[in-house]
């Protein structure tokens, strides 16, 4: 029984991943994939250095939440990796396309009201601070502070995120 697409291996051992699969996984030219052997089957998976943060990422997010009062989230370019906000709802789930676009623009920022709701994709978000995590010029993902109240976030929190993004980029 064959449920997949059949491809030939060329003389250098290369296999072309079909365009439809690359699109559905958001694979872009130059991105890394993990190749492993699992139970006798070849497994290809999009590589995310931030997935390997483990305890460091979780600890950093919890500390930032404790000291700022805002929920902290860490994401790669596709999914939320760490979340102090409704962990079961967000961890492992796709980030909104608007947030992905902002991160890929390589800019940090603070957003309020409707703009915060639009970027995050949820209407309960009233404040949102975002900073991309960069390594060797590449955007690995981002770190976010999420506020559910209408209180204005202090400007210094964006600076905290920039410091955190630098720290996390050194951990991968």
Image (cartoon, helix red, strand yellow):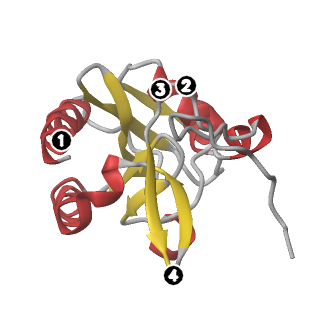
Gap in angstroms between the C-alphas marked 2 and 4: 29 Å
Residue 55 circle label? none
> Is 126 left or right of 3, judged from the image as shown?
left
Please, what secondary structure does the residue beneath circle 4 have? loop
**Element under disc 1:** helix
Q: Name the residue carrying label 4.
A: 39
Horizontal side of 11 relative to 146 (left or right) equals right
Give the Cα separation between the discs numbered 1 and 2: 28 Å
**Label 1 neighbour load within 10 Å: few <14, some 14-19, many 20+:** many
Name the one closer to the observer, 122 or 19.
19
* Residue annotated with mark 3: 30
According to the picture, the residue beneath numbered tag 2 turns out to be 29
- The span from disc 4 to disc 3 (Cα, nearest Å) is 28 Å
Tags 3 and 2 in contact by the CB under 8 Å rule? yes
Task: Mark yes or no: residue 59 visible.
Answer: yes
* Residue 127 x/y as whole percent: 45, 41
């Amino acid at each position: 029984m064959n449920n997949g697409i059949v491809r030939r291996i060329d003389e250098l051992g290369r296999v072309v991943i079909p365009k439809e699969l690359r699109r559905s996984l958001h694979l872009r030219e130059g991105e890394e994939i993990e190749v492993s052997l699992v139970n006798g089957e070849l497994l290809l998976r999009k590589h995310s250095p931030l997935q390997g943060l483990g305890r460091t990422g979780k600890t950093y997010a919890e500390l930032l939440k404790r000291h700022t009062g805002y929920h902290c989230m860490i994401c790669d370019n596709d999914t939320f990796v760490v979340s102090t906000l409704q962990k079961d709802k967000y961890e492992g789930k796709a980030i909104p396309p608007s947030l992905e676009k902002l991160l890929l623009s390589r800019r940090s920022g603070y957003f309020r009201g409707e703009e915060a709701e639009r970027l995050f994709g949820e209407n309960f978000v009233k404040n949102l601070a975002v900073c991309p995590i960069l390594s060797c010029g590449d955007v690995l993902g981002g770190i976010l502070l999420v506020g559910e109240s209408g209180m204005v976030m202090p400007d210094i929190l964006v600076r905290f995120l920039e410091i955190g993004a630098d720290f996390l980029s050194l951990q991968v």
